[in-house]
Amino acid sequence: GDSVTQMEGPVTLSEEAFLTINCTYTATGYPSLFWYVQYPGEGLQLLLKATKADDKGSNKGFEATYRKETTSFHLEKGSVQVSDSAVYFCALRLNTGNQFYFGTGTSLTVIP
Amino acid sequence: KAGVTQTPRYLIKTRGQQVTLSCSPISGHRSVSWYQQTPGQGLQFLFEYFSETQRNKGNFPGRFSGRQFSNSRSEMNVSTLELGDSALYLCASSHYSGSDEQFFGPGTRLTVL
């Protein structure tokens, strides 16, 4: 069935370190792919998205490229900040229907 | 523009009881989806309502039900509560069914004792 698998956390990095959070998916057809972020005490917010193969989504210094050949959508940031500490969720939405499938989330803590 | 609101924010119930959670979408949004979030399972899709009709349904037992009103507000009901129903219940709204972006509310934290 359709699903998203993302790397398990928690991840702890020092400020200015490079971040990669892996995400792979299984889906029929051609899904749209998303990264959502949940800051402490807040609701999920859309971080970035890509709707077709080879698209790159970017926002707030984060990037992810839709790789159809590897069914992946890895999240990267070149230099993390303490304010990036949050839980990150990879998600897909099939082009039929409006059901989103989320990964289990990866907790990131950035220490000064 | 006001965001998605959910009430109540916290709820404590005992096994066997039932509970109703409420979600008010962003003004103009007609699609409302519900998710259950637990530490072990992450976010799991419950169902989606659009124009007062259930459009999609996840793999949850019939104890979980919902409805949507003409003003797009939605309610979710869980009957005969079990300990395993303890979770954060999230509501998300979007302009229409199939919209790329969902806007999430802060959630209702349900604890079943």
Image (cartoon, coloured by chain):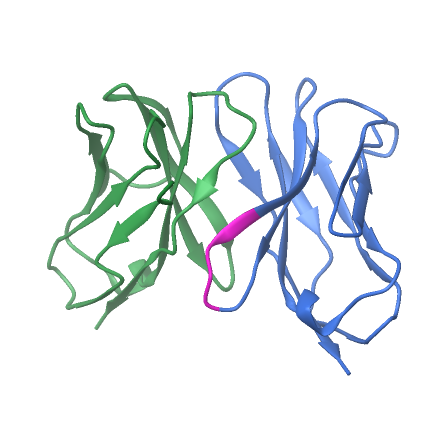
Horizontally, is B107 left or right of A3 in the view? left
Residue interval drawn in magenta: A41-45
Q: How many marks?
A: 0
Q: Position of residue A24 (x, y in %)?
A: 75, 42
Name which quarter of the figure residue A26 lies in. Answer: top right
Q: Is residue B12 left or right of residue A24?
A: left
Which quadrant of the figure has residue A28?
Answer: top right
Which corner quadrant holds the N terminus of chain A? top right
The residue lying at 38 percent from left, 40 percent from top is: B1
Colour in which the image shows chain A:
blue
Q: Is residue B38 magenta?
A: no
Q: Residue drawn at (23%, 21%), measured in percent from left and top? A: B52
Q: Is residue B42 left or right of residue A26?
A: left
| Image position of A48 with respect to A66: above or below | below
Q: Residue furthest front?
A: B1
Rendering colour (chain B) = green
Most common secondary structure along the magenta stretch: loop
Which quadrant does the C terminus of chain A fall into? Answer: bottom right
- Residue situated in front as seen by the camera: B82 or A65: A65
Report the residue that reaches farthest toward the bottom: A112
In the image, B92: left or right of A91?
left
Q: Quadrant of residue B2?
A: top left
Residue at figure coordinates x 88%, y 64% from the top left: A18
Pinpoint residue B105: horizontal percent, then vertical percent: 38, 49
Where in the figure is residue A40, as x and y percent of width and height? 52, 68
Up the image or down, A20 lies above or below A69; here it is below
What residue is drawn where x is 89% and y is 58%? Answer: A78
Q: Which residue occupies the foreground of this view, B66 or A87?
A: A87
Does residue A10 appear in the picture of this structure?
A: no
Please provide percent x and percent y for residue A35: 66, 45
